[in-house]
Amino acid sequence: MPELFLVRHGQASFGAKNYDKLSPLGHQQSLWLGQYFNERQCHFSQVFTGTLVRHQETAAGILQGLDEAPEPKSDARFNEFDFATIGQAYLNLYPAETLAPSASPSEFYRLLKKAMLAWSQNQLNPDDVSESWQDFKTRTSGAIECIKSHQAEGPVLAVSSGGAIAMMMSVILGLDAVQVIELNMQIRNTSFSHLYFNQHNIRLSSFNNVPHLDTLERLPSITFS
């Protein structure tokens, strides 16, 4: 069966005005991952990315580390959910939980977990969100079907986001919403999940791997945003 390497983007610009671009470390993580794949002679037959800048910059860094690779194909089904909109929709219901501008990343993620849970339970105002939880699940299921439908002659690389990857895992493994939310919070930047697939099935082999960062000098480069 062909292999799929499903990669989360590199560290983005958390706290900046525009989150949707890689930080300098995010670019370095992506290059290191490409070099790792190159050392292991991963000759990708196809490369997919979402349409977000951080996806495409991550793919570019990975490809920079490879001796050769095909031109990436962009597909919005690999995109992240709109977490800013989901968070604001939650705060519209619970304004007292609004964070201070100086709030820490951990406070932000605690709020996001609450917002995602409310979203998954259809508690948010539909007029305040761009897609429902079920629409998000359907969209990411389409990304899986996109992979399965291709006649791959070698490993496939796909670059996406934490929430989208967690939702894909829910489809593949039959996880519930709480498990999806927990997985989303655990997926590391430029980690890859390794899967096998054909036109009928897709099977998880390993999850959230960062071997390119698993050295003493690179441990500080393991990030989650």
Image: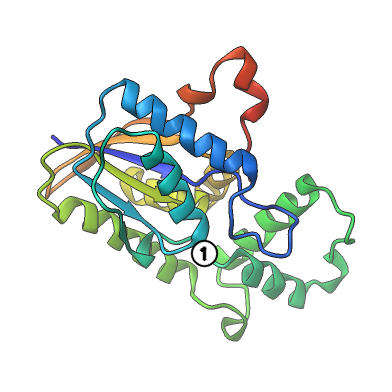
Identify the residue shown where x is 88% and y is 61%: 101
Identify the residue shown where x is 61% and y is 30%: 222
Residue 101 placement, left or right of 160: right
**Mark 1 secondary-structure assignment:** loop
**Where is residue 84, by image quadrant?**
bottom right
For badge 1, the amino acid type reads: Phe
Residue 26 placement, left or right of 112: left
Report x, y in % for residue 125. Answer: 62, 81
- Quarter the N terminus occupies: top left
Vertical arrangement, residue 63 with respect to residue 114, above or below: above
**Where is residue 173, by image quadrant?**
top left
Frontmost residue, 115 versus 222: 222
Report x, y in % for residue 47. Answer: 28, 49
Frontmost residue, 32 versus 82: 32
Instruction: Give the farthest residue toward the bottom.
Output: 127
* Number of residues whose C-alpha sits closer than 10 Å to that of mark 1, classed few (under 14), some (14–19) or many (20 or more): many
Structure colour scheme: rainbow
Q: Which residue is mark 1?
A: 81
Vertical arrangement, residue 124 with respect to residue 20, above or below: below
Frontmost residue, 146 versus 128: 146
Count of numbered labels shown in the rendering: 1
Residue 154 placement, left or right of 164: left
Q: Is residue 169 visible?
A: yes
Q: Is residue 188 visible?
A: no
Identify the residue shown where x is 44% and y is 55%: 56
Report x, y in % for residue 85. Answer: 63, 72
Residue 56 placement, left or right of 214: left
Frontmost residue, 202 versus 114: 202
